[in-house]
Image (cartoon, rainbow, N blue to C red):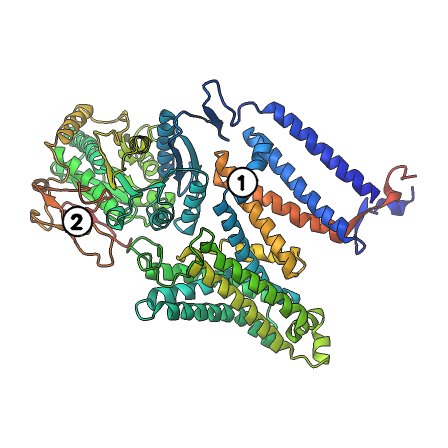
Amino acid sequence: MKKFSKLVALALAGVMAFALCACGADTNDGSANNNGNTAVVDGNGNTNVVTNAAVKAGLICLHDENSTYDLNFINGFKAACDAAGVEYLIKTGIPEGQEAYDAACELAEAGCNFIFADSFGHEDYIIKAAKEYPEIEFAHATGTQAHTEGLANFHNAFANIFQGRYLAGIVAGMKLNEMIDNGDITAEEAKMGYVGAFTYAEVISGYTSFYLGAKSVCPSVTMEVTFTGSWYDETAEKTGAQTLIDNGCVLISQHADSMGAPTACEQAGVPNVSYNGSTAAACPETFLVSSRIDWTPYFTYCFNAITNGEAIAVDWNGTLETGSVVLTDLGASVAAGSAEAIAEAQAKITSGELHVFDITTFTVNGETLTTYMADVDTDPEYAGDHEAIVDGYFNESGDGLRSAPFFNLQIDGISLLDAAY
Amino acid sequence: MAKTNKSEPLFHIAKRSDMTLKKAILVRVIAIFAALVVCAIITMITTGLNPFTVYGSMAKGAFGTARKSWITVQDTSILLLIALALTPAFKMKFWNIGGEGQVLIGALATSAVMLKLSPYLPNPALIAVMFVAAILAGGIWGVLPALFKAKWNTNETLFTLMMNYIATQLVAFYIIVWEYPKGAGKVGIINAKTELGWLPRLGSSMGGKYLLTIIIAVITTIAMFAYLYYSKHGYEICVVGESENTARYVGINVGKVIIRTMFISGAICGLTGFILVAGIHQTITTSLVGGQGFTAVMVSWLAKFNPIIMIFASLLIVFLKKGAGEVATSCGLNESFSEILTGIIIFFIIGCEFFIRYKIVINKKTMKGGNK
C-alpha cells in the first residue's frame, strides 16, 4: 500500500506541474479584453470578439468543413457573427434525426437565442425544439414547413439561386456560341449536360434556370440531365459527367456537392459551370463560372431583427439584390463579352424587367403554360395547392408562397437520362 | 549469467485476487484522473486551450443547467436499462452483444404501431399496444439466437451481432416505406400534430418530461436486482453460467433457462426501444440507439453485473460523453474531437480493469545487476 501511495502522490504532482505550466501558456481565453468585451478564441485560432450581447447564435451543420455545402454556411455564419460582434457556437456532423433535436437543445441550454440548422432533413427536429423553447428564434435553410406550422419562433430561409444559375447559364450559352462561331460544333450540336442529385424541386428549378439562361443567348441549345441519388458522391458525379460527355455534351454543369463533375471535365477538356464556389484552382483550363448562396445577409438580417426586437420573416428569400445570390469571378476560358452580358441580365432581373421563368421562353409538352398549381404546402396529398403562374411568369419562391423552390416542371429541350432518384 | 535466463522475459503477467475493494476503487479513480490529464494534454496540444477551461466545460456539459441535468439523468437511465437487459444473459455466460438490435427492433415495432394504428385506437390503448409490440419484438430478437444456441449450440456472439445488422437494415427499409415528406428519406417526428402515442409527461414542471423514463429505470433496476439475487430463476442463471454440466446434473433444463433468460434480456431492450420512441424522440432512425447497445456491455462488465453499481457506471459514461461533447462545442472544435476524448477516457477505464485483475511481476533475475 505504501508503494501505492507513492504512485498516487507522483501522479498528483505530475498533474499539478502540468496544470501550472498550462496556466502560463494560456493568456486570453475567455478573458475580458481592453474594451470590456469578451474575446473567445476557438480551437482553430479564430477570435470571436463579442460586442453585441443581445444575440448568441448557434449553427447546426449536417457535415463539417470538408463538405462544400456546409463550409458555405460556416463561412457565412462566421462572417456575419464577426461583423455583428455576436458570440457563436457551431455543431458539426449532426445527422438528420433525433441528434438534430438534441443539438438544438444543447445550443439552447448553452444560452443561444438564435439557432440555425442547415440541412433539409433537420426541419422536423428543429420544429420540435422550437415548440419547447418558445423564447428562442429557430431558423432553417431549405425547409418547407414554416408557413404551415404557424410557430412564431420558427422560420425558413432560402435564396433565389435560380437567378444565379440563370446568369451562369448565360456564361455557358456565350461559350456555346463561341464554339459554334469557331466551327468546333454546329448549332444543333450545342448540347449541355447536367449532373443532378435528386429529381427534387430544388434541383429541377436549378437546372431549368441554368438551361433558360443558356437558351436566352444560344437558342438552339439542348440539355441532358442525369441523377446520382446523393448530395455528395464523388465517384457517381464523375461517372455521370463522363457519361454526358460521351453522349456528346460539350459543356457540363452540376448540382451536387463534390468535385466529381469538375474533375471529369478538366480531364476531358470540357467547359464546366460549377456550384457552391469557384473550382478555378483545381480546374484552371475548363472552369467558366460558379454560383452560390451567400448566407451572410440572412444571418445579419436575423441578428438585427433580434437586437431590435423585430420579428423574423416566416419565409425569407435572398436575392441578387440582397447579396445572397452571388457569382464567382469568371474563369480564364469564358467567351468574350460574358461579364457584360451578366451585368446586363442582372440589372434586368433586379429591376423586375426580366423573369427567369418567363412563360414565353419555355414550353411544356409543346405548349405554353398559362396556369400551374404548385405543391407548396407539405402535406400527405402531394398535390398542387397554390397557383404559381402570375403576370406571365412562374413565381418561383414568390412572396406569400414559400422560400424553398417548388418549380418541378419538365420543360421542352431538356431530356432526363434517368429519373430513378 | 546462465544461458537459460536469456530467453526469460523481463516481466510476466499474473492473475491477482488479493486486491482490496478500497485499492480497487483507488485504481479506478486514478485511471479516470489520468484519462482527464491525457485529454487535457491532447486538447492543449491541438488547440492551446487552458485545461481547466476544458474540465469546467466537461462538468457544464452534463450539469450546466437544470434541464441538462435532467437530460443527463434521462440518458443515464436509458444506458442503465440496456445494461440491465444484458446482465442476466452475461451472468449465464451467454454473450449477448445484440442489445443494439434488440432495442432498435423494439423501437421499430413501437413506431409501426404509432404510425399505423393511431387513427383507429384511443390513445391509452394505442400506447398499450405499442408497449406490448415493443416487448414482443425485442423478446423475439433475443430468443432467436437463444433457440439456435439451445438446439444446435451456435455461437451466440456472432449470432446476436448479426441480428444487430438485420435490425438496422429493417429500420432503414421501413424509413423509406414510411418516409415523409416523399423523397425526404426520413420519417420525421411521428404524429407531430396530434401527439398520439406520445408518452405523457408527469407534471407540468420541466422535469416532468424526463421523469417517466427515470422511474421506469429505477423500477427495472430494483426488479433486476431482486431477480438475479433473490429468485429461483436468478439462481438457475448463475448455475448455468458456472457450469452447464452441473446445472444438468442438478436437474436444471439448460435450454429452457437460456431461452427464458434471453427473452427477458430482449424484452427489456424492447422496452428501452419503446421509451426511446414513445417517450423521448418520437422518431425512428437507424442511429436511434447510437451504439449504446455496445456501451451497455461495458457498463454491465464494469459493474461486475451488479445492478446497483451499474447506476454509477452508466452515470460516469454519460457524464464523460456529455462533457466531451461540450468541450468540442464550447472550444469551437469539430464534433469528431469529442469522440477522440470519449475514446481516450473509455480506454483508460477499461485499461485499469487489467491492473485490478492482473499484476505485472518483474523477473528480477533477468534484470541487470538484479534488485538487491
Count how many numbered circles sit on residues in the image.
2
Label 2 secondary element: loop
Furthest-bottom residue in view? B251
Crowding around mark 2 (Cα neighbors within 10 Å: few <14, some 14 to 19, many 20+) is some
Say which chain tag 1 marks. B
Dot 1 corresponds to which residue?
Answer: B60
Location of residue B164 in the rendering, given as x and y in whole percent from the top left corner: 50, 61
Q: Is residue A105 above or below residue A286?
A: below
Horizontal arrangement in the rendering, residue B149 relative to residue B68 (left or right): right
Residue assigned mark 2: A410
Q: Residue A235 location, x and y as percent?
A: 38, 45
Q: CA distance from mark 1 to mark 2?
A: 53 Å
Identify which residue is drawn at 76% across, 50% down.
B22
> Which label number is shown at residue B209?
none
- Kindly state the secondary structure of the residue where label 1 is placed: helix
Relative image position of residue A16 (x, y in whole percent)? 69, 31
A58 or B109, which lies in front? A58
Residue kind at label 2, given as amino acid type = Gln
Farthest residue to the top: give it.
A34
Q: Is residue B95 visible?
A: no
Q: Are marks 1 and 2 on the same chain?
A: no
Residue at x-position 51% and y-position 38%? B328
- Position of residue A238 relative to residue B303, above or below, is above
